[in-house]
Image (cartoon, helix red, strand yellow):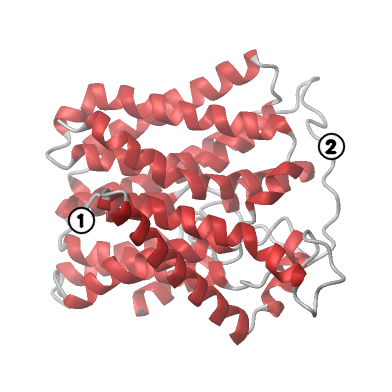
Amino acid sequence: MTCAGIGKVVQDRTPLGQYVSALIITLLLTLTLASLGVLPVQSAAYDTIWQQLMPLGAALYLLESDLSRLKDVASPSLAGFGIGAVGTIAGTLVAWRFFGSQMGPDGYKLASALAASYVGGSVNFAAVSQSLNLAGPSMAAAMAADNVAMAAYLAAIGLIPANGPNDSNPLPLAAPAHSAAEAPLNQAGSVELPLAHAASAADQQMHHATSIWSIGRAVGAAWAACWSGNALAAAVRVPQASMACICLSASVIGLLAPRLSSLTHRFKHLSVASAPNIFTGAETLGTWLMLLFFATIGASAGSWNALLASKTIFLFILLQLSIHLLIVLGIGRACNLNMQVLLTASNANVGGPATAAAMAAARGWTNMIRPAMLTGSLGYAIGTAIGIALAPCMRI
């Protein structure tokens, strides 16, 4: 908990946090303490975090993602995001052909987790790792390589020019946010912020709307998602799909929440789009639970040798993301999609909604902020299922 808190403070309040996420800081701190013998390599507390709190954190992440608002996003953004997801899948399979034999017995699990991560963000990496029982030094090495490569990739695409004669006003300007639920930037506290932080007045509204009641509702809904997801996986006799089912359940609850809120007596005069988010604060709480999970990854690795042995993983990711970018730019431009749309979509695939919105804001693409957030949230919802589905294709 202390290491997670230090990582969050460093990310939010120091210049280093502009380039290194709380996730990687937390992992490195616990890895160092474990290598010095301060933290145990194995503990019953780690098992509790792995089996109970990590699924809860993943569910909390999805509760504030109202996927019904995807209909407000122009089709080019959804097309760009879909092309990026296909690029990640293709990149994963090609990279596996070249490096799979060098990644050890857990290689297919690592590749599946990385594929999920580059469809919609590191939350998916954690979910697939838990689902496939990936743990120990190999997971710590992959997690560190994932974050370093992600930061480098997002910095690189942030330098790609997108101001050609056909690259202005790619989408209609988004309608102004009328409530906290419609705010385009509601990701404050995300673990995935290796780029400059984005902020807005709507963020402050969301923050101040958090209450003990909204947190209580969020935790209750997340537990319900975990229970129903596990029950669904057991019913179809595919227990390894429990995390995918949990994510599906949480997405459905998040989708229905605004409608339930709009039907209550207090908010009956509001439309579904204007109804307050009844799970405000869920993502922030989910962030802390995920940081605890990544702290256990670092401690379980036990030695810096885990990171020093990650050369093959870096090469795998390099080829994986190179193919992803080639497909995004090649097919995307062939389909006459705008560079702003393609770069934002690729960022949402690899880094998640927060980094995509941050890049859009930093480059002055204000009309891309909302699509970045919503398509990135879609990545949270589908990334885990895609990663798990790829595992049998690569298992040796």
Q: Is residue 231 left or right of residue 299?
A: right
Q: Nearer the viewer, residue 20 or 207?
A: 207
Residue at 71% x, 67% y: name it: 203
Residue at 15% x, 28% y: name it: 101
Looking at numbered disc 2 in the image, what kind of residue is underneath it?
A: Pro
Q: Secondary structure at mark 1?
A: loop
Establish if 381 lies above or below 293: above
Q: Nearer the viewer, residue 232 or 255?
A: 232
The residue sitting at the bottom extreme is 212
Q: Quadrant of the C terminus?
A: top left
Instruction: Name the residue carrying label 1.
Output: 135
* Mark 2 Cα shell of 10 Å, populated few (<14), some (14-19), many (≥20): few
Looking at numbered disc 1 in the image, what kind of residue is underneath it?
A: Ala
Q: Quadrant of residue 251?
A: bottom right
Residue at 75% x, 27% y: name it: 163
Give the x, y percent position of residue 366.
78, 45
* Mark 1 Cα shell of 10 Å, populated few (<14), some (14-19), many (≥20): some
Give the x, y percent position of residue 40.
15, 74
Q: Nearer the viewer, residue 264 or 136?
A: 264
Establish if 374 lies above or below 290: above
Q: Secondary structure at mark 2?
A: loop
How many dots with numbers? 2
Q: Which mark is residue 172?
A: 2
Establish if 91 lies above or below 71: above
Q: Quadrant of residue 262?
A: bottom right
Q: Can residue 180 be seen at all in this image of the molecule?
A: yes
